[in-house]
Structure formats: structure tokens, C-alpha cells
Image: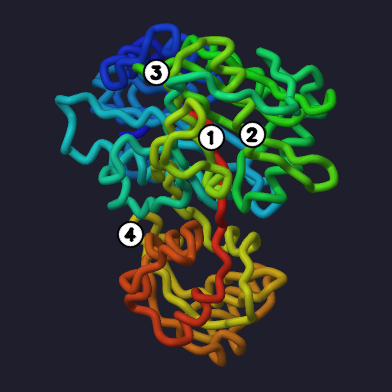
């Protein structure tokens, strides 16, 4: 049984969090002080006895109906597993959409391999779809837990280690000024950052003053430092620095180009490393960057007092489509194409079915249809939507595709497409999906 945690199980959830994740106490305390109360926490419990009040009212109707009776008054049963939903606003091709970031998924050892996580994820998909959300996403500890539930990777990061074995030369002229702490003008910094990210990324987190304030608290809880960067007195970006094992890790790097579009991203990185070395003299650094920094990174080798190691690409964010019709509104193609396509989804029955998909350079429309023209007309009359029965019958058959494969098409890179992803598609289906411009690159940097 899935219930929504209403505050009464906070201590039990904290204990489960530490049993499963073993976070340093300051970081766990940050999460439960600053984040937990704003998140929706779903619990898989062994028994519904005693779940009443607000907890009972949050139960999905399908669970209450399955019981066939009113919920009892006295509490009993154990918490078997949990899942935390962290609400964010994403900018998807410039459009602001609500999306929940799944964190804190855990099952206590005695309840593992009993379908606990399956129940949690299935319930979560239905809840979020019913609220109108088009997607959800997570950073997996192990991708194999989530691949069966049709999550697919859509975002990677670059990691490169740099060793200082001598005195690295300072730039001839320092362009940037660095200051520990939040930007001096939070509103202006957020506006500049969101504008820069929207130009560069298809999917990114919307940055707000509250977001940055909470991020600074998160960084401090892990004994790190948030650094704000200025160019000629104007906000130019930020990054986080913190010790991890034998490295100083520089992450969550954001760079805002000049208003005229010019940028010197390599100088930004160079001076950021100089700043970190002056502050800490750590000698060994790891920089963590989004994929758009590939051309700014140095090839492996020795460079005037520093040794640069090879760049590693690491997959970090998996996406799961919840409402294909809604998602279609933010998609586009590099040419026009149309077809009927059948989508298979084992965990969201209401998403499975046939769709009419029109795609072009200006946008995309995906509308669920039925194979029966009369039923389609009746459904259109009932919903008030245009009747697409005739159009859908005339559109070529695109074949069928799993929601997992479709997720890879939408969020992955074109060059990463494999023949296996096309399984079940006709020539018309292949033409349409080859025309699709994926929601890439992306930039999602938050940990929780």
C-alpha cells in the first residue's frame, strides 16, 4: 500500500534514509531541515491499518477501491520502502514546465525483491500524470534498477582531473573576479543565467533566488563553498568547490556569456582553477561540466606545471515520459513528417495506445487516436477537440514503439541512436523519428 507521508513518520524516514544512504549527518540534517518539508514523500507500508486523516485522504482512489472498505482508525504495519518527489521548474525549449525529480528511493533490506519499488514507481507515474506533468527524472545509483521501468538516459556530464606539479602560469590579464557566497544581485543573476541557459540548452532547471539560497546551504552542509564570478562588475557565472577523497572537486559550473554573445569559456575555467589553487593549494582537481564544454577542455598531457588527464563522459540523468501528448508541444523536427504510431507502455495503461503525430520545423502535435473512426468522432465531440478521424486514417502507419525506445529518441543524441531502437517501426515511423530534434543538450546539476 502506498501512502503519502504527512509528517508523522519523519523520524522513521530519517532512520531509513541513513540506513540506506549513509550520508554525513550535516548533509542529512540539511535535507530534512531545508528540503524534506517541501517534498512529497511516498511510503510503501505493509498494512493500511491506522492510516487516517490527511494520510488517508492522499491515497489514490484505485487503492481505496481495491480495499473495498473504509480505512481503519488505528495505526499498524511497517514502512517497507520510500520515494521522495522534489518539485522543480524546468525550462524545456524555453517553456516553463513543472517536473518532479525522484530522489531518496530506498527499500529496507528485509523487504527487497518483493516488488516494493515497483509499487512505488507505478503509483508515482500515475500521480504525476494525473497532475498534468509530462515527465519525471532521476539520478540513478544503479541504472539497472530503473531501465525495466522505461527510464532512459538523456543527460551526461564531463569529468576531467588536473594535477598541479609546479607553478602554473597566471593569465596575462585576469578577466574575472571571484567572491565566495551568493551573487550580490540574486534576481539579476537568475535572469542572466536562465537567459543564457535557454539559448544553449533544450532542457535545464529554472534558477530562482530561492534555488540559489538553498543550494548554498546544501554546499555548506557538505563543507564546500559556492563561488560567484563577475566580469567588469557583472554576474558571469558560478561554481561549487569541495574536497572529495584526494581531489578538490569543482562542479555545478555555470558560465554566462557577454551580452554581445562573445565568450571566453576556457579563460573562465583557467582562472577558476587558479582561484581554487590560491585558496586551498590542493594540487589535484576534478572539474565536472555539462556536455557543451567539450571543445574547451584540453587534451591529455603536461602543460606548464599541470598534468591534464583524459576526459571521462558519465551518464547522470534518466528521464521517464508520463504524458506524450503534452510533451509533444515542446518538440520539433528538421523537416515535416506525419504518421500514426502505436506506443507501448506497461506501467501507464492510459498512455499506451495509438497516436497521430505531426512534426515540423515550427513544432509538433501528438494526439491520441483510436483505430475506429466512429469512436474517434464521438471522443472528439465529447472532449471538444477537433475531429482527426479522417486525418488519422489517411496518415501512413508508422508501426509501434515502446515508451522506453521513444524516450531514447526524444532525450538522447541523434548520433547515439541504434538500430534496436527502430524495432517495430515502419518506413514512415523511421522517417518521422529521424526528423525529430531531440531535447539535447541538457543541464540539470542539482543533487537533491
Residue 254's place in the image compared with 442, above or below, is above
- Disc 4 to disc 3, how far (Cα)? 41 Å
Residue of label 4: 346
Which element type, helix, strand or loop, lies under badge 4? loop
Which element type, helix, strand or loop, lies under badge 1? loop
Q: Quadrant of residue 279?
A: top right
- Classed neighbour count for the residue bearing mark 4: other residues with Cα under 10 Å, few (<14), some (14–19), many (≥20): some
Q: Residue at x 56, y 52 (%)?
A: 441
Q: Choose the circle earlier in sequence order: 4 or 3.
A: 3
Which element type, helix, strand or loop, lies under badge 3? strand
Residue 105 screen position, x and y as percent: 35, 31
Residues under numbered marks 4 and 3 in contact, where contact means CB atoms less than 8 Å apart = no
Q: Choose the circle earlier in sequence order: 2 or 3.
A: 3
Image quarter where the N terminus lies is top left
Which element type, helix, strand or loop, lies under badge 2? strand
Q: Choose the circle earlier in sequence order: 1 or 3.
A: 3
Q: Choose the circle earlier in sequence order: 2 or 1.
A: 2
Q: Quadrant of residue 395?
A: bottom right
Residue 170's place in the image compared with 319, above or below, is above
Residue 445 screen position, x and y as percent: 53, 34
Residues under numbered marks 4 and 1 in contact, where contact means CB atoms less than 8 Å apart = no
Residue 286's place in the image compared with 261, above or below, is above
| Rendered image: mark on residue 244 | 3
Residues under numbered marks 2 and 1 in contact, where contact means CB atoms less than 8 Å apart = yes
Q: Residue at x 55, y 55 (%)?
A: 440
Residues under numbered marks 2 and 3 in contact, where contact means CB atoms less than 8 Å apart = no
Residue of label 2: 254
- Disc 4 to disc 2, how far (Cα)? 38 Å
In this rendering, the label closer to the viewer, 4 or 1: 1
| Rendered image: mark on residue 81 | none
| Rendered image: mark on residue 445 | 1
- Disc 4 to disc 1, how far (Cα)? 30 Å
Amino acid at each position: 500500500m502506498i501512502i503519502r507521508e504527512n509528517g508523522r513518520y519523519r523520524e522513521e524516514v530519517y532512520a531509513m534514509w541513513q540506513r540506506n544512504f549513509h550520508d554525513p549527518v550535516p548533509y542529512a540534517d540539511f535535507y530534512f531541515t531545508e528540503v524534506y518539508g517541501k517534498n512529497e514523500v511516498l511510503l510503501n507500508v505493509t498494512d493500511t491499518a491506522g492510516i487516517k486523516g490527511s494520510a488517508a485522504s492522499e491515497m489514490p482512489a484505485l487503492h481505496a477501491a481495491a480495499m473495498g472498505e473504509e480505512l481503519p482508525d488505528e495505526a499498524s504495519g511497517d514502512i517497507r520502502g520510500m520515494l521522495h518527489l522534489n518539485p522543480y521548474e524546468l525550462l524545456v525549449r524555453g517553456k516553463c514546465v513543472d517536473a518532479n525529480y525522484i530522489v531518496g528511493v530506498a527499500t529496507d533490506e528485509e523487504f527487497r525483491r518483493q516488488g516494493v519499488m515497483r509499487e512505488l514507481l507505478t503509483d508515482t507515474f500515475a500521480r504525476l500524470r494525473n497532475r498534468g506533468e509530462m515527465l519525471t527524472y532521476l539520478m540513478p545509483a544503479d541504472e539497472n534498477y530503473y531501465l525495466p521501468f522505461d527510464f532512459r538516459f538523456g543527460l551526461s556530464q564531463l569529468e576531467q582531473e588536473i594535477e598541479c606539479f609546479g607553478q602554473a602560469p597566471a593569465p596575462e590579464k585576469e578577466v574575472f573576479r571571484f567572491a565566495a557566497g551568493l551573487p550580490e544581485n540574486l534576481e539579476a543573476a537568475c535572469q542572466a543565467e536562465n537567459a543564457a541557459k535557454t539559448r544553449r540548452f533544450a532542457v535545464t532547471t529554472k534558477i530562482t533566488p530561492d534555488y540559489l539560497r538553498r543550494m548554498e546551504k546544501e554546499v555548506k552542509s557538505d563543507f564546500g563553498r559556492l563561488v560567484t564570478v563577475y566580469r567588469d562588475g557583472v554576474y558571469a557565472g558560478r561554481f561549487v568547490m569541495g574536497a572529495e577523497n584526494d581531489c578538490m572537486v569543482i562542479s555545478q559550473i555555470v558560465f554566462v556569456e557577454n551580452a554581445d554573445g562573445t565568450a571566453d569559456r576556457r579563460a573562465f575555467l583557467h582562472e577558476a582553477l587558479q582561484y581554487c589553487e590560491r585558496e586551498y593549494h590542493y594540487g589535484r582537481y576534478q572539474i565536472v561540466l555539462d556536455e557543451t564544454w567539450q571543445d574547451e577542455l584540453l587534451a591529455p598531457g603536461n602543460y606548464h606545471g599541470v598534468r591534464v588527464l583524459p576526459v571521462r563522459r558519465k551518464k547522470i540523468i534518466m528521464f521517464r515520459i508520463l504524458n506524450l501528448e503534452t510533451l509533444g508541444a515542446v518538440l520539433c523536427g528538421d523537416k515535416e513528417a506525419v504518421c500514426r504510431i502505436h506506443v507501448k507502455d506497461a506501467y501507464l495503461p492510459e498512455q499506451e495506445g495509438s497516436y497521430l503525430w505531426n512534426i515540423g520545423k515550427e513544432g509538433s502535435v501528438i494526439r491520441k487516436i483510436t483505430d475506429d473512426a466512429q469512436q474517434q468522432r464521438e471522443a472528439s465531440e465529447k472532449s471538444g477537440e477537433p475531429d482527426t478521424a479522417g486525418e488519422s486514417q489517411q496518415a501512413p502507419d508508422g508501426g509501434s514503439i515502446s515508451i522506453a525506445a521513444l524516450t531514447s529518441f526524444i532525450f538522447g543524441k541523434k548520433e547515439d541512436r541504434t538500430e534496436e531502437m527502430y524495432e517495430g517501426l515502419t518506413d514512415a515511423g523511421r522517417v518521422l523519428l529521424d526528423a525529430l530534434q531531440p531535447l539535447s543538450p541538457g543541464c540539470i546539476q542539482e543533487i537533491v
